[in-house]
């Protein structure tokens, strides 16, 4: 069995899609429009696992984040430094949350435009 996707509820899908496509070079793989909600599937071109963004029509207020949710994690591109990846994510609209020099390992955290935490992991050589 393979991992399929992780779903996040969002109130501003356009802004969140822009963040993930600019920060991590992901692409919109498909969109499914239903009567009361729209699903957006994003991810790297060469991978099947996806991030599903769910927008419930008419519910533009910020969603409460569950206490059990932690974060999603993304590896840097091969040859990309952790610092460059972090700066790219912040420049794409991510919140400057926990920079590489604030973390005790080869990782950092940004928050996406909805406030979800994204861990950026330095790819091992």
Image: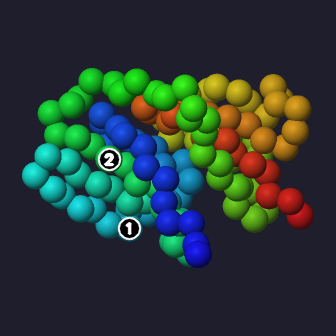
Question: Label 2: few (<14), some or many (≥20) within 10 Å?
Answer: some
Label 1: element kind: strand
* Labels in figure, total: 2
Does 48 sit left or right of 57 as displayed? right
Residue placed under numbered mark 1 in the picture: 29
Q: Earlier in the sequence, mark 1 or mark 2?
A: 1
Q: In this view, does 60 lie above or below 87?
A: above
Q: Which residue is located at x 73 percent, y 37 percent?
A: 108
Q: Is residue 50 above or below residue 74?
A: below
The foreground one among 13 and 59 is 59
Whether residue 19 is visible to the viewer of this picture, yes or no, is: yes
The foreground one among 22 and 63 is 63
Label 2: element kind: strand
The foreground one among 78 and 4 is 4
In which quadrant will I find the N terminus?
bottom right
Residue placed under numbered mark 2 in the picture: 54
The image shows residue 77 at horizontal and vertical percentages of 70, 61
Question: Label 1: few (<14), some or many (≥20) within 10 Å?
Answer: some
Does 8 sit left or right of 33 as displayed? right
Q: Which residue is located at x 42 percent, y 43 percent?
A: 8
Camera-side mark, 1 or 2: 2
């Amino acid at each position: 069995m393979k991992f399929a996707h992780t779903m996040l509820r969002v109130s501003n899908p356009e802004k969140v899609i822009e963040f993930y496509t600019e920060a991590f070079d992901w692409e919109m793989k498909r969109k499914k429009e239903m009567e009361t909600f729209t699903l957006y599937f994003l991810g790297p071109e060469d991978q099947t696992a996806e991030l599903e963004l769910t927008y419930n029509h008419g519910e533009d207020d910020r969603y409460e984040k569950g206490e059990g949710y932690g974060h999603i994690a993304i590896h840097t591109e091969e040859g990309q430094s952790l610092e460059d990846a972090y700066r790219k994510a912040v420049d794409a609209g991510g919140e400057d949350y926990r920079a590489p020099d604030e973390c005790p390992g080869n990782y950092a955290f940004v928050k996406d435009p909805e406030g979800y935490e994204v861990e950026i992991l330095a790819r091992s050589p």
